[in-house]
Each structure stands twice: as structure tokens, then as C-alpha cells.
Amino acid sequence: MRRHKQTGKARSASLGVILIWSLLTVFLQPPTLSSESADFEDRLQAAVEQAERELEAEKARIQRELRAREDELQKVRAECETLSDQIVEGKIALAQKQGELREIRKQRETLWAERTQYQEDRAQIKSICRDVETELSELLDILPVSEQRQSQEQKLTTLRESVDNDTIDLMIPSVFELVESLLNESRTAAVYTEEILDPQGRRQRARLLRIGQNLFAYHIDGASRTAVAISDPYQEGGFRWYEGLSEEMQQDIISAIHQAENREGIYALPMDVTGTMTAATDLSGKSLEGRFRAGGIVMFPLAVVALWLAVLIVERLFILLRESRHSLQFCDQILSLCGDGDFKQAEQLANKRKGIVSRILRVCLANRHQPPTVLDDAIQEAFLHELPRLERFLPSIRMLSSVAPMLGLLGTVTGIIATFDMITVVGGGKPRLLAGGISEALITTATGLSIAIPGLLAHSFLSSRIEGLIADAERFAASLSNVLKQKQSTSASRGDKTGSAT
């Protein structure tokens, strides 16, 4: 519209310029004659009229353009109003969308918080189910076999797999089913036939009686054997079968089994209500094999260490006994023979004996013609050859004597760990079980000390014996060396005198 206004103004300006130019053309022509002035006036009048007509036409045209522009302006205004309404509606819709977006964000945050809480609850449920699975597994391990043990183990396997696979749908029902099965056992009695491990370690088919989870007993008809399950922390599972029952107790158990099968009457049973009927924990009455088994797996390396240490000590004792076969009389005889100059007899006497002293003396006699420095070097070299032979295996004896108590301490630590594991199962209200486990855990320490103390004493004894042998050999070698050096000096002085006399 602004472009049309500028075009109309330009046309008006051009018409004005034409009109002014026409007037100037008329007025600026020189008047020549009166007739010409009349014509001039006519032409001027005609030019003015023509200009007026053109002005009127231009005015009409401008008015038409103005009306068109007004119509166009009205249309633009209507369009602007329409656009303004659309903008307002768009703003209203945008505000509604923003409100909906805020609601969606709130819902998303709520869902995210619920998802996080769900994940935490799921992880907590998984952790609880894992703990329950561990406790139920340990509980099934320490209980004698029951009539539902196979199904319970299947449910336990399902629970373990669901925990490993993070399957909540199977995890929780498995826990409740297994707990329900154990609770049903705790408030019911049953008679069933299962395979048991008797006190002698043999597998037997027996008729079992279960009263809740407090009493388990069996009777083998063919062998006429009856037993009850008692607590024993030293056995696998924490219990063992005890057959040392009185005749009356055996009859009560057999009668209870028959009555429970027929579901008749009230029957009496021997029950350890106080929980004090446990396996004997007095280690003084245990055999060597029982102590070895009670010590656990660490007893095997301790046995190897003990055997190895004993072999080394016996071997060193034998060598030292053989090396110490000399006497002061023997050494004095060699010294006296050398003092008299009878070296061949001295060598024969030295060759008859064995040991470090005789070997050192033979080295001295073999080098008697050498200069004193060479003789001393030969003696020193002989000692360097003899020392490793005498001190062989002494570092090993000391090392094994030091390793034995550390192995014993390792066995004690592992035994105490097992005792604390038992606490998690049976609780801390049974001091006899805990004290028994700790006392047997200390067996390895006692065994290690029993190996280490004799080993250290033997090492000290052998070291002192070796030092004594070396001291004797050094003493007699020094005495013989002095005798030989005196003989050499005497022979040299005689030779000098003989030379001077000649």
C-alpha cells in the first residue's frame, strides 16, 4: 500500500510540472501582434481548461485509488484481526500444552521415583531371598533327612535358580513354599523309610520317626538297631546318630514307631528337652585318628612337615654320630707319633678312623712337607669342604620348625571361622557347641607347637654338636700343625749345620 501511495504522489507531481511548463511556455513567448495575443489567450484558456480536465481526471483517479486502498486496508485489517485471533488461540493452546507437559513431567518424575523405589525394593527382596536361601540351605544340612527332603531340596534349587536369574515371580512363592514345608514339619510327626549314615559310616535303610524337628530316631528291623539324633558339632551337618541307648529307651522308640504308623494312643519318647545331650567334647579320650580328623584339612600339611622334619633330624643324628667317632686318646697318639717323627704310623692310625677330626689330621699329615703358609691354607680349605657337609639340612630343619606353628595357627583360624558360621545357624545360646568347636580348632595349634618344639630343640642340639666337632678339629689341627712346623724348622736347622760343617 505504501508503494501505491508513492506512485500517486509521483503522478500528481508530474501533472503539476506539465501544467507549469505549459503556462511558462505560453507566458514566456513574446507578444508580437494583438491577433496573436488573442490567439495566445485562447490557447492559454484552452491549456488551462485542458490542465483542469487532466487535474480532474487525475483527482478522480486518485480518489479511485484511495477507495481501492481503503478497501485493501479493510481487508488487511480483517486479516490482521483474524491473525490476532489465531495468535491468541495459539497462545491459549500453547499454554494448555505447556500445562499438559508439566503434568507429563510430574508423572514422569513420579514414575521414575516409583521405578527407583521398585528397583530398591526388588534388590532388597532379592537380598532377603538370598539370605533366606542360605539359611534354609544350612538348616536342611544340619537336620536329619525327613520324608519331604527331596521336595524341599527341589524347592530350594528353584529358589536358588530364581535368585540367580533375578526372577521375582518364582522367588517369593518358592520362599513361602519352602518355609511352609518346614513349618509343617515342625508341628507334625511322621514315620518313613529313608537311607541314613549310621555311626560306623555305613549307609543303611532304616525306619525313621520324626517328631517335629526336635526328635529324630530310627530302627533297623533286621539288625535290631535303634538310635536317636544328637547334636555333634564335629560331624558334618552338626548331628550324629547315637545308638548307645538303654533297653527301655530302645523299646520306647520301637513302640512309638509302631503306634505312629497306626495312629493310635499316646506314646512316650526319650527327648533331650534341655539340649545338653551332645557328643562328648573331652579330647583327652579321643584317639590319635580322632584328633587328626578333628583338626581338619590343615592336619595333612602338618603331618607332612612332621614326617619331613623327623627324617631330616634322624639323618643328621646319624651323620653326626658317625663323624664323632674319635677320642682324645686317638688324637694324642697321632700327636705323639708325629712328635717322634713316625709319620707313616700316624697316617695309618688316622686312616683307620672316620670323622672330621681324622680327615683334617690326614690333610695335615699329607701336607707336612709343604711350607707353613701352604699347610695353613690346606687346613683352611679342608675346613671349607667339611662345613657344608656338616651343616647340611640344618636350615631346612629350622624352616620346618618355624612353619609348623604357623600352619597350626592357620588351622585354628579356619576352625574359629567355622565356629562363627555355626553361630549364624544355631545362635549363640549353646555354649557347649561353641566351646567344643573352638577346642577342636585349637588342636592344629597344639599339633604345630608339638612339631615345632622338638624341631627347634633338635636344631639347637645339632648346631651345638657341629660346633663342638669343628672346635675339636680346629684344636687338634692347630696342635698337629705346630708339631709339623717344629719338625720342619728342626730339619732346616740341622741341614744348615751340616752344610756349614762340610
Image (cartoon, rainbow, N blue to C red):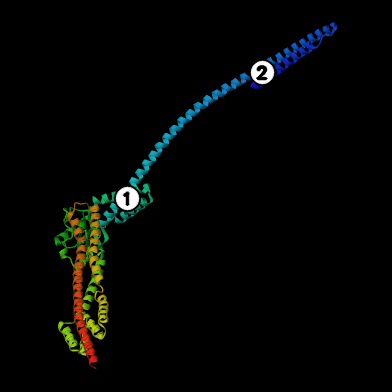
Q: Any mark on residue 33, and which?
A: none
Q: Any mark on residue 68, and which?
A: 2
Viewer-side residue, 315 vs 219: 315
Give the amino acid type for the residue marked by disc 2 in the picture. Ala
Q: Residue beneath label 1, please? A: 130
Q: Residues within 10 Å of mark 1 (few under 14, many from 20)?
A: some
Q: Is residue 111 above or below residue 70?
A: below
Q: Is residue 140 left or right of residue 122?
A: left
Give the amino acid type for the residue marked by disc 1 in the picture. Arg
Q: Residues within 10 Å of mark 2 (few under 14, many from 20)?
A: few
Of helix, strand and loop, which one carries label 2? helix
Q: Is residue 395 above or below residue 493?
A: above
Task: Give coordinates of residue 470: x percent, y percent.
Answer: 21, 76
User: Mark 1 or mark 2: which is in front?
Assistant: 2
Look at 64% across and 17% down and name the residue there.
70
Task: Give coordinates of residue 198: x percent, y percent.
Answer: 23, 63
Quarter of the image where one finds residue 447: bottom left
Viewer-side residue, 226 vs 55: 55
Q: Is residue 434 left or right of residue 152?
A: left
